[in-house]
Image: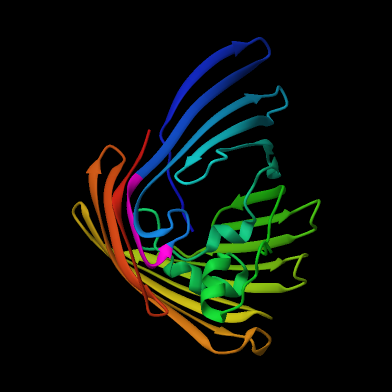
Amino acid sequence: MKKVLLATTALVFSAGYAAAEVTIAGSANMGFKYNEAGLGYAGKDTAGWYEIDMTVTGTMESDAGLTFGATVDLDSVYGNDNQDYGGTVFASGAFGTFTVGMVDPVADDYGMSDIGFDGIGIDDVAEIGNYSFGLTTLEGLTGIDFGDVDWGVTADARWDYSVGAITLGASIDTINEDYSIAAAYDFGVVKAALAYSKDDLSGYDSTQFKLSGSQNGFGGEFFYATSDLADSYGVYGSYKTGALMLEAAYSKAELDNSFGGGSGDAWGLGAKYDLGGGAKVAGGIGDIEGNTVADLGVTFSF
């Protein structure tokens, strides 16, 4: 799963009874991708890639001490003729944060890390058991053509709450009736998380567990998911020295007999070099069930 820390530029206004703030944040990447089986967006095995994510957030604080806000997300992705935009509206207080709009299911906060500047898909195999996967990966492992079926837990409302070392969350799709709940505890060096999700379209549910930690430049993750579809797991490790970080990952999925049984695995090696100021050069190479994948590019935030 991708997590990006964004720098912000703030405009602060005096709004009579409350202070209002508007922030503009952004992140982007560009580079090249390779897939021995062919890149779906390009129709060939090697092609350029870019992705832009711009977010405008406005917040205000009420006299009662509650914070209300809204975001507008503007995305542009290579090979996507219909550029995306979406928004959320939220309220925060002692109860945590309640958000309505284009939100991610809370279980997605605890996925496995990937290799490369945009991700070469090693995590997709590990996450098949909890529906945070691309159908392309599943079709490749099973040989089943799912056509336009779009499985995967979605959400349009979520609640997040943190107190001390405990983090709690819940999300629901009020139209599709998907839902997800999650809890995490930070022990200091190690953090453990457990999540449960239900996909209304397929009727399947899934449980996932993630253990992560870092110390003295070393980082590691163990991820496991189980469902009626598959049991899957993955391990990720990293080592950071100065501006350089080296990465390695392995994942495997054991499919249920109703999907043909069998198994598939993936591995990857990568590196990231911090250029400072929020910019990095990153790349990775790996193998997904005998298919070579790779990428190389830069990422930055502003």
Number of marks in the rendered image? 0
Q: Quadrant of the C terminus?
A: top left
- Rendering coords of residue 295 (x, y %): 32, 58
Out of 39 and 302, give the one closest to the viewer.
Answer: 39
Out of 47 and 87, give the one closest to the viewer.
Answer: 47
Chief SS of the magenta region: strand
Q: Is residue 209 left or right of residue 276?
A: right
Farthest-out residue, front: 43
Decide if residue 57 is in sight here. Answer: yes
Residue numbers of the magenta segment? 30-38
Q: Is residue 296 left or right of residue 25?
A: left
Answer whether residue 212 is magenta in the image: no
Answer whether residue 31 is magenta in the image: yes
The relative height of residue 145 versus residue 31 in the rendered view (above or below) is: below
- Rendering coords of residue 20 (x, y %): 60, 19
Decide if residue 238 is in sight here. Answer: no
Q: Quadrant of residue 95?
A: top right
Q: Quadrant of residue 122?
A: bottom left
Q: Residue at x 55, y 38 (%)?
A: 83
- Rendering coords of residue 74 (x, y %): 54, 34
Q: Residue at x 39, y 54 (%)?
A: 118
Q: Residue at x 69, y 81 (%)?
A: 228
How does the figure colour the protein chain or chains?
A: rainbow
The relative height of residue 17 versus residue 216 in the rendered view (above or below) is: above
The relative height of residue 298 versus residue 137 in the rendered view (above or below) is: above
- Rendering coords of residue 255 (x, y %): 59, 84
